Image (tube, rainbow, N blue to C red):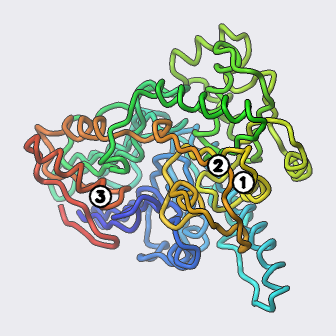
Amino acid sequence: MQIHFHGAAQTVTGSQHLLEINGHRLLLDCGLYQGRRGETYIRNLNFAYEPRSVNAVVLSHAHIDHCGNLPNLVQDGYEGPIYAVPATVDLATIMLADSGRIQESDAEYVNRKRLKRGEPPIEPLYTEADAARAADLFRGVDYGEPFEPVPGVIARFVEAGHILGSAAISLEIEEKGRKIRLWFSGDIGRYKLPLLRDPVMPEEVDYLLMECTYGDKPHNDPSLAFREFREVVERTIKRGGKVIIPAFAVGRTQELVYHLNIMMYADHLAPVPVFVDSPLAVNASNVFRKHPECFDAETRWFVQQARHPALDFKMLTYVQSAEESKALNLRKDPMVIISASGMAEVGRILHHLKNNIENPLNTVCIVSWQAPYTLGRRLADREKRIKIFGEPYTVKAEIATIGGLSGHAGQDLLVNYARATKETAKKVFLVHGEEKPAAALTEKLADRNMRAVYYPELHSSVEI
């Protein structure tokens, strides 16, 4: 058996791990790599293996850095099933369609500017039609239900607590008379996150493939981050500004809406208009409503007490049309605008930023990890001069960063997650993390007598 680390290796995005078992190929995730524009295009377009040779894909969850390159995989000849839990099937279907639309739209917008400068046009990475072809291959499997993606492999999805439908993937493998238990964490969530159930720990695992995004940072209790978020919103409203939040349309947006709902329902925050300006986020929120089986007990209680769904309240508007979106930038009253993408690389958030970034009354609130070289990272790093759609802007708005709202496990939980396998694990492979967090987590595990911990390079392979 071999594991090939073709994505999210020594970086965070682009999750893609290829297993060779009994002469078959099983792909865990197929995500988009996010980083420098030119590099991302080439890297996402070209696979390090032949897509036609893959027999099955198992998808941990619907975030675009885990599912976003499936359309290219299918376009290059993949025809097998893509297994995921039903909530992930629904979310990934709309995520991929939206990704295709955005890439077509952004290419058209950029090409108008390139035409004026006499530059050649660019092609979108893939289209909405390409995304639909990939979605046709989805196969829904419930949490805990065993299935056989390739001969000799029994797989199960286990709650990961990261976003709706997120799962760790447990694999029981029989190969050449050996039995191997492999566990892929996907993205590990946190305890006490709104809406979602807590992550389930691995057990009796021979080989653990796990994320290490925040391997160097323990997280505070989410309630403290919630309080910090409330303070950001409150002070911006008091000075008459807008709170602009780049947020992932799936997961983070719904958590923020839930927080704002509680603020105005139970915390007596002065009510202001809240706009979710992302067609994808609107559709994703509908998927959340469709899958209450994934909600935790606290969310079900809040829905009962408030007598309305957790993701709807009086001051909230879900924006659908481009005209409604543009109208928000003409308004001067205080408001909260939540818009995709979460790293401020594509979509409507770019238009909100260019119209509001030079007004000191406003706040840009960064609520998630930002990949290197993205606009979101430049804002989080407090760069004073940025470019949006190739045009320069001076950052005069307040920049607030709230790391505690992350949907990823912090260092403490990551240590406990790995230690849950201490008695049985032969090797732990750290993925989905940069070098510094990986090194810090490796050191923490070594202190606890877990020394067979590896940080594989991109496109490297290991035989087990």
Q: Residue at x 83, y 86 (%)?
A: 115
Residue found at x 48% / y 50%: 369
Q: Identify the element where label 3 is drawn.
A: helix
Instruction: Give the x, y percent position of residue 223.
Output: 48, 24
Tell me if I can see residue 283 in this picture.
no
First-in-chain label (2 vs 1): 2
Q: Residue at x 60, y 28 (%)?
A: 230
Q: CA distance from mark 1 to mark 3?
A: 30 Å
Q: Residues within 10 Å of mark 1 (few under 14, many from 20)?
A: many
Label 1's element? helix
Check residue 349 in the rendering and tell me which mark sits there, or answer none.
1
Residue 22 visible to an observer of this rendering: yes
Crowd band around label 3 with a 10 angstrom C-alpha radius: few (<14), some (14–19), many (20+)? some
Q: In front here: 205 or 349?
A: 349
Label 1 or label 3, whichever comes before in sequence order: 1
Q: Is residue 128 left or right of residue 152?
A: right
Which residue position is annotated with label 2?
Answer: 246
Quarter of the image for the C terminus: give it: bottom left
Disc 2: CA contacts within 10 A as few (<14), some (14-19) or many (>=20) = many
Residue 8, placed above or below residue 122 = above
Q: CA distance from mark 2 to mark 3?
A: 25 Å
Residue 88 is situated, as x and y percent measured from the top left of the image, at 56, 42
Considering every residue shown, the one lying at the far top of the view is 305
| Circle 2/circle 1 CB separation < 8 Å | yes
Q: Specify whether 439 is left or right of 189.
A: left
- For the residue pair 266 and 401, the one nearer the viewer reads as 401
Q: Are marks 1 and 3 in contact (CB under 8 Å)?
A: no
Figure quadrant of the N terminus: bottom left
Instruction: Looking at this view, name the residue that lies furthest to the left.
Output: 449
Amino acid beneath label 2: Pro
Task: Choose the circle earlier in sequence order: 2 or 3.
Answer: 2
* Residue marked by disc 3: 436
